[in-house]
Amino acid sequence: MSTLITGGTGLVGAALKSVVQGPSFFASSRSHDLTRPEDVNRLFEEVRPSKVIHLAGMVGGVKANSDYVADFFTNNIYINTNVLHFASLYKVDKLVAVLSTCIYPDDVTYPITEDQLHNGRPHESNFGYAHAKRMLEVQARAYRKQYGCNFITATPTNIFGENDNYHPENSHVIPAIMKKIYEAKQQGGDVELWGSGKPMRQFTYSKDIANILMFLMDNYDEEESINIGNDFEYSINHVANLIADIANFKGDIIWRTDMPEGQHKKPCDMTKLHDLGWNKFTDIFRALECTYRWFEKKYPSLRGLS
Ligand code: NDP
């Protein structure tokens, strides 16, 4: 009765370590390259999981997504195809696979509901990643239909927390701001952040996402994907000020309005999650504080930096 977590070494994988109960196996690409069917077969043979949380994927920021658009498509298609195929062959009882809100169409009705997933093209900057993730949702539904597999998909908003990726070109907004503020503080100067700071985003602490994924394992069996995360929207500026407070940063935050900042807002609808009974989220200040304290302790031995 073991739980297999693919992508067990990543941001969400690290958060799941304190949440998963019973025997579990957190897979890494070092031991099993999931783009290779023989490695995935070996993984399922070794673990014989009854439950799978499928997190693994080639994940990156805007620049990486457009520079390596073909690799993002192909690697994610291979990983997802292999994992779901072998989960079916090894008769896994339940699989929860993770999509992303950035794969929704560019032209949508807000707040974004789950039924809009295939209603138009994703943003051009990440179309390889987005289409591969959309095919994960299609594959899960196909395996449910033909083989009766209990495969579900969940779609998280922006996630942050301990064990994030701090790569200078490849990190998400919160780790990027944390690193810039920390380094500016060490150098005693101001900090420059991209954009105006005005875009609004739904941010969710990785430990909340981990708890929700376990909750869905027991409480959600529907074919349609489910949006997951905190539906409260914060401006990037607000989050940067919170991080500056936590870091006790005395310099100024200078917004580089000549640099790109993405869409103004892209809120997702969380009605389905709330209707299932999930409403509790860690306070953003507390979540950022825990993350920043962890970051400070680890710097510079961080994913994407060392
Ligand atoms: P990370 O980038 O932190 O981790 C990615 C994981 O995938 C790592 O454990 C990595 O293993 C593994 N992986 C990558 N390639 C392979 C491979 N070829 N074979 C085996 N394992 C591989 O991701 P997150 O934890 O941030 O995200 C987890 C999931 O949630 C992803 O599917 C992502 O798309 C989704 N998501 C994330 C969001 C976010 O804001 N972070 C937002 C919405 C969705 P290793 O380190 O050993 O190479």
Image (cartoon, helix red, strand yellow):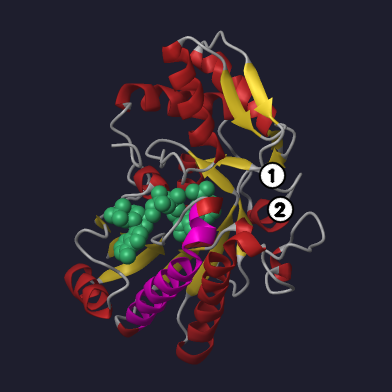
Q: Can residue 213 be seen in the rendering of this structure?
A: no
**Drawn side of residue 142 relative to residue 108, left or right:** left
Q: Is mark 1 within 8 Å of ligand 1?
A: no
Q: Can residue 54 be seen in the rendering of this structure?
A: yes
Report the image quarter containing ligand 1: bottom left
Mark 1: secondary structure: loop
Query: What is the spatial separation of the Cα atoms under label 1 and label 2, in whole angstroms?
Result: 7 Å
> Magenta segment range?
64-88
**Disc 1 + disc 2, Cβ < 8 Å:** yes
Residue 268 numbered tag: 2
Residue type highlighted by circle 2? Cys
Q: Quadrant of residue 88?
A: bottom left
Residue 231 numbered tag: 1
**Measured from the top left, where is residue 234 in percent x and y?**
69, 34
**Measured from the top left, where is residue 67 in percent x and y?**
49, 59
- Of the 4 image quadrants, the one containing the C terminus is top left
Q: Earlier in the sequence, mark 1 or mark 2?
A: 1
In the rendered image, the residue lying farthest to the right is: 109
- Which residue is rendered at x = 58% and y = 37% of the image? 281
